[in-house]
């Protein structure tokens, strides 16, 4: 769990509750909503405070350990790990599936765009909207 070490290194108070939220985020495949995280945590720790989950997620985003994604109508979170910080997202507007895609050109492109006006870019969020393969072929979903 070297990512938990990273969290410690950041020098913030790492309470057992926060560790629980971060671990749940690391363990959830892909992108998880706050509600999904609440559900999986309260499986392990009945009565876990929802507000703690929300506050911890905010803190993790602030610390650069998680990313908040506005995908469609819901907020989702994902843990940031070394090597995946700069990936972008494709969102299927039909089924809501989210795909991580690496676009190596994006950092250069942003750099060129921003340096002209001496702007410092902290992060880039690129979301491609559309329809995923199974929705496009319509084999899995009912009509509609
Ligand atoms: Zn889809
Ligand atoms: Zn992602």
Image (spheres, helix red, strand yellow):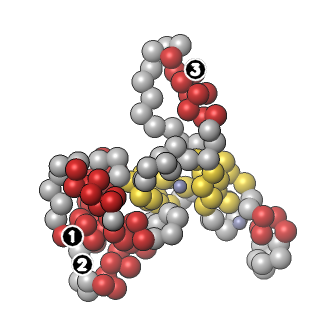
Name the N-terminal-most of marks 3 and 2: 2
Residue 57 visible from this viewpoint: no
Q: Establish whether ligand 2 lies closer than 8 Å to the Cβ of label 3.
A: no
Quadrant where the C terminus lies?
bottom right
In this rendering, the answer to whether 38 lies above or below 77 is below
**Residue where numbered disc 3 is placed:** 112
Which percent across, then down, holds residue 126? 58, 42
**CA separation in Å, label 1 and label 2:** 9 Å
Q: Are marks 3 and 1 in contact (CB under 8 Å)?
A: no
Choose mark 1 or mark 2, whichever is in front: 1
SS for callout 3: helix
**CA separation in Å, label 3 and label 2:** 46 Å
In this rendering, the answer to whether 28 lies above or below 62 is below
Which residue is found at the position 17% from the left and 52% from the top?
12
Residue in front for this viewpoint, 127 or 99: 99
In this rendering, the answer to whether 140 lies above or below 55 is below
In the image, is 2 to the left or to the right of 93? left
Residue 104 visible from this viewpoint: yes
SS for callout 1: helix
Which percent across, then down, holds residue 141? 76, 77
Return the residue found at the far front: 2
In the image, is 142 to the left or to the right of 55? right
Which residue is found at the position 29% from the left and 47% from the top?
63
Mark drawn on residue 17 = 1
Which percent across, then down, holds residue 1? 33, 65
In the image, is 114 to the left or to the right of 92? left
Name the N-terminal-most of marks 3 and 1: 1
**CA separation in Å, label 3 and label 1:** 42 Å
In the image, is 95 to the left or to the right of 123? right
Which residue is found at the position 58% from the left and 20% from the top?
112
**Residue where numbered disc 2 is placed:** 48
């Amino acid at each position: 769990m070297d990512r938990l070490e990273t969290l410690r290194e950041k020098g913030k108070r790492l309470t057992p509750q926060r560790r629980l939220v971060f671990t749940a985020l690391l363990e959830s495949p892909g992108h998880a909503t706050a509600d999904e995280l609440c559900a999986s945590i309260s499986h392990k720790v009945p009565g876990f405070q929802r507000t703690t989950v929300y506050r911890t997620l905010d803190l993790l985003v602030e610390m650069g350990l998680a990313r908040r994604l506005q995908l469609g109508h819901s907020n989702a979170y994902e843990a940031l790990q070394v090597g995946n910080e700069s990936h972008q997202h494709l969102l299927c507007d039909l089924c809501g599936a989210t795909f991580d895609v690496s676009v190596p050109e994006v950092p250069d492109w942003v750099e060129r765009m921003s340096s002209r006006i001496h702007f410092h870019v902290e992060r880039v969020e690129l979301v491609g909207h559309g329809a995923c393969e199974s929705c496009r072929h319509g084999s899995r979903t009912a009509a509609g």
